Image (cartoon, helix red, strand yellow):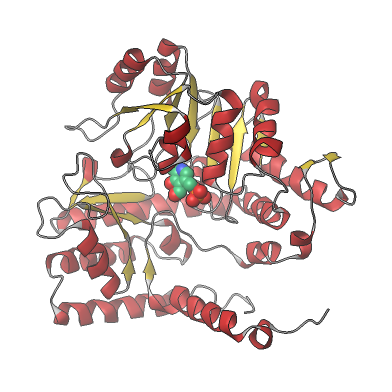
Amino acid sequence: MEHRNLSEADPEVYEALKKEISRQESESLEMIASENFVPRQILEAQGSVLTNKYCEGYPGKRYYAGCEHHDKIENLARERACKIFNAEHANVQPHSGSTANFAAYFAVLEAGDKILGPKLSHGGHLTHGHDVNFSGDLFDFEAYYINEKTEIFEKEDIIEAAEKHNPDLIVCGYSAYPREIDFEAFREAADRADALLMCDIAHISGLVAAGEHPSPFPECDIVTTTTHKSIRGARGGMILCKDKYAEAVDKAVFPYSQGGPLMHQIAGKAVCFNEALKPEFKDYSRQIKKNAQALARSLTENDVRLVSDGTDNHLVLADLRDEEITGKRAEKALEEVNIVVNKNTVPYDPESPFVTSGIRIGAPALTTRGMEEEEFKLIGEMIAERLKNPEDTEVEEKIKENVSKLLEDYPLYSDSGVKF
Ligand SMILES: Cc1ncc(COP(=O)(O)O)c(C=O)c1O
């Protein structure tokens, strides 16, 4: 076997990788709410020889020999996850948030069972019942809705939906909801319907880990998450649960829905959880919320309306229904000035999901770069100005200059010793 530098062995992949490093480091302000930048120690774990091994099964009970060191790593990931989230059991093998949800549903339900989940255009994820996804195909989904007046998932609406539909399981947890989740309200709704309660904390897991969002335990029976969003770890998924569901969850992951675990990713998760247990991670998560709030204030002061008028977490959802711009055009206009966000439906959106009337803007990635309230205030001003002047080339040039300056002032990997 010949070992060569990537640049020599595969110049095409190397060139694309180099361009992506430059895009992340010095070309754009990353404000997609589900993205983040991982530290070097996580890249190191992910890019390691752990990728070489088959480890079907679980620590101590593998189907292959030679898993001693992988057992150590997976146990560390599981123990740290339980400690962080106050969970009785953790399964760190799901390859992604979607496969975590697949396994979590099948751990406690059968195809055809009824699930009550959020209306998708009100902040849910495809795996919460969309008909193009396995969830909508294999389960009988009914929806609960955001209250049109308060723009919050209100307790009485959830309870009413639970009593009306009598589901086997209720899902809470969202991709685009700027407010805290009221777990006690969901528990009460679940109890009224004699249903299980699952929360998908994919977006907010970093905030939960740091105590900056209420914990889904003890109210929830099963909790799923991604490990690459606000918790800032290796890309992947995880399931946390009470002990009584542990065996069913493990079987639903392997052998029901996955084969060999991605051990290099599990190592990246273990390192991420080690970081999340440090006091600095609490400071980081607190700063995410402060930054999202500074952004919310700045946008509001500059006449951009926000769904529910603000945020309790890491993201804001701008409602452009009263503006002369759709979510699709807004995403493009901001990309033209190197601010990267995504178009997003707002509750009761008259536009299709391909056009939308909103944009979702997140704080985790730029908080990782070290930006604070002052920078987020400036970013809010720039976003508002661009939304109101999407065709103005002078505005475009001015904002691009300010963006470049911010990127220079807050380097990402250039001083980190990461080798590419
Ligand atoms: C709430 C929620 N659940 C699940 C997922 C799916 O995660 P993945 O893309 O890793 O499959 C996402 C992804 O954005 C999400 O926002």
Location of the N terminus (image quadrant): bottom right
Identify the residue at image location x=42%, y=34%: 136
Q: Nearer the viewer, residue 164 or 212?
A: 164
Q: How far from the left and from the top, in percent, is residue 120?
A: 33, 39
Q: Nearer the viewer, residue 163 or 295?
A: 163
- Count of marks placed on residues: 0
In which quarter of the view is residue 104 placed? Answer: top right
Location of the C terminus (image quadrant): bottom right
Identify the residue at image location x=42%, y=12%: 193
Q: How far from the left and from the top, in percent, is residue 370?
A: 45, 65
In the image, taking residue 123 as reference, residue 12 lies left or right, namely: right
Q: Is residue 146 above or below residue 259?
A: above
Q: Is residue 414 visible?
A: no
Identify the residue at image location x=48%, y=21%: 113
In which quarter of the view is residue 354 placed? Answer: bottom left
Q: How far from the left and from the top, in percent, is residue 362?
A: 36, 55
Q: Is residue 92 visible?
A: yes
Q: How far from the left and from the top, in percent, is residue 337?
A: 27, 75
In the image, taking residue 181 as reference, residue 256 lies left or right, namely: right
Q: Is residue 307 above or below residue 9?
A: above
Q: Residue lying farthest bottom? A: 8
Q: Is residue 21 above or below residue 285?
A: below
Q: Nearer the viewer, residue 401 or 373?
A: 401
